[in-house]
Image (cartoon, coloured by chain):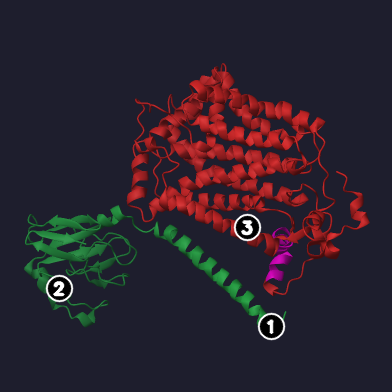
Chain colours: A red, B green
Amino acid sequence: MDKNRKVHQFKNPVLNWIEFRLPIISYFKKEYGDYPMPKNCNYFWSFGALATITLVTMIVSGIFLAMNYTPHTDMAFDSVERIMRDVNYGWLMRYIHSNGAAFFFIIVYIHIVRAMYFGSYKYPRELNWILGVFIFLLMMATSFLGYTLPWGQMSYWGATVITNLFSAIPFIGEGLKTWLLGDYNVGNATLNRFFALHYVLPFVIFGVVGLHVAAVHVHGSNNPDGIDIKTNNDSVNFFPYMLIKDTVAMCAFGVAISAVIFFGPNLMAEVDNYIPADPLVTPAHIVPNWYLAPFYAILRAVPDKLGGVLLMFGAIVILFVLPWLDRSKVRSCNYRPIYKWFMMGFFVNFFALGYVGMLPAEGLYLLIARVGLLYYFGFFFIITPFVGWIEKPSKLPLSISDVYAKNISPNIGGGEKGIPSPAMQKDTNL
Amino acid sequence: MAKKPKNKRRDFLQLSTVTLGAVGTAAFIWPFLKSMSPAEDTLAAGSTEVDISAIEEGQSITIKWRGKPVFIKKRTKDEINAAKMVQASDLRDPQDDADRVQKEEWLVLVGVCTHLGCVPLGQKVSDMKGEYDGWYCPCHGSHYDTSGRIRKGPAPKNLDVPPYTFLNDNTIKIG
């Protein structure tokens, strides 16, 4: 053991006692107290905190639902109805959980949009981005598994359709599908294992989130101008400034999700899922949850079974290599006059894909899905590398303080703090 | 930092924010805790109606109420007298027989030993009934008399009398 270890001293002797044995107090002080946040971060930077809060809410409400849920094909649907009617506040647990899932995706999509637009995925935060995409994948798997549990018509047929994707794999596909289901079709064995996995995956997500947060704290958060913190004048401490800001965001989020939970709890639900699962009758129109619809649109846009499956998974896998497809060293799209518009086009396109993913795959909708598919992959494989090469970025501010020095009268916003020293100016040519 | 009058506003804001946060958190936690108490359908199963017309004198039946056994016994004259003769003050858990029954021939008891929750013997003719001819708990040897009162052994209390009403001469509603 390191005898020279410098033990942090606190006023409270209890804290000192703990700190000497487990330096967790100084860790929290460093990572969540004194942690420097770029002072120009806007409310987009609150969505990481919101996502964490939502994850915890989902885990808690999920545990309480599990106390009353029965993972058996004969009883699952009735046990959910019992939760809705007889269990004290069961309706609230369930509506928190089902709408919480939808809001979790809304938040994470905004979080991803922020990371893409402001270039948070670039050096030195590539691994952070990869962990994030991994979390996104786990979330999609978890939500799919959870959607099966109420054992309504959409649960059953959604599970059937998605597990049949694996049968597209040549040679081993059918065998793999049967192995995954534990039966020849979606049955009790499937429901049991889906419940087990749906229970455990959120804790896996929680672990990866821990790594995700630890990774971002190494090099600090990105910011709307995409430039690094250079001096103390560029940053504020996480406590209390960003904590209060995140709390304000949390209050706004609480109002939004409460409005849905209490006044429109089934807005984002499919009515067919209130019909018990029937293996002999398929609903006329199978739709995934809206937050998975863009990928579903890609699946249906391809007139080939294996091709559709590959492109759908490819649409997610491609995200992993985004940091290496983008050749530009400028992070924020605010300083990228061309790429900025392609980026916004990407977001609109993703939204459009989601829209047609909820509609029947025919006629104009199918055409939109195919155009959207082309743009989706074209954006990553052609636009992103190519624009980075030809584009001339606009002039970056010298420092984060400099942004304020320019925007606000120097007497107020900058003062002596705002003017960068010559030493700082030297290394700002990104 | 010394508190100056101008900090009052900040102190007020800080205190009211923390208070509101604490109240909000408590309000959020409450439904979760409440969801763990018995659900409506469980409560609805909390009362049971029993037909007692077929029970002969000296016979006892066991029914299930809230998941627990309930003994309904039609006592003989001798048993009633034995129960009445006991001085309440001599008992570990003093109670007169009259306070434990509504009609003296009908004894209704929760059949759970007050020691550690076993079901006492004594319902069947062949069962051991203990030294006081009532019930005997096989787990740790508690003896109950013909009024279900603890007379010997480790149990601290008499067998519970559940809430019940006679709907008519032949029907008891328990719970």
Disc 2 to disc 3, C-alpha distance: 71 Å
Using the rendered view, name the quadrant where residue A239 is placed: bottom right
Against A213, residue B175 (above or below) is: below
What is the quadrant of the N terminus of chain A in the image?
A: bottom right
Q: What amino acid type is highlighted by mark number 3? A: Asp
Q: Are marks 2 and 3 on the same chain?
A: no
Q: What amino acid type is highlighted by mark number 2? A: Ala
User: Secondary structure beneath disc 1?
Assistant: loop
Residues drawn in magenta:
A15-34
Residue plotted at (62% across, 53% down): A49
Residue that mark 2 sits on = B83
Report the front residue among A194 and B99: A194
In the rendered image, residue A309, in percent from the top left (x then y), is placed at: 57, 24
In the rendered image, residue A15, in percent from the top left (x then y), is placed at: 69, 70
Report the front residue among B143 and A366: A366
The answer to whether marks 2 and 3 mark residues whose Cβ atoms lie closer than 8 Å is no
Report the front residue among B95 and B20: B20
Residue that mark 1 sits on = B4
> Which chain does tag 1 point to?
B
In the rendered image, residue B166, in percent from the top left (x then y), is placed at: 11, 64
What is the quadrant of the C terminus of chain A in the image?
A: top right
Residue plotted at (55% across, 51% down): A54
Residue A246's disc number: 3
On the picture, is B38 further left or further right than A219? left
In the rendered image, residue A270, in percent from the top left (x then y), is placed at: 41, 37
Report the front residue among B64 and A260: A260
> Which chain does tag 3 point to?
A
Using the rendered view, name the quadrant where residue A166 is placed: top right
Residue plotted at (11% across, 69% down): B79
Disc 1 to disc 3, C-alpha distance: 29 Å
Q: Main secondary structure of the magenta part?
A: helix
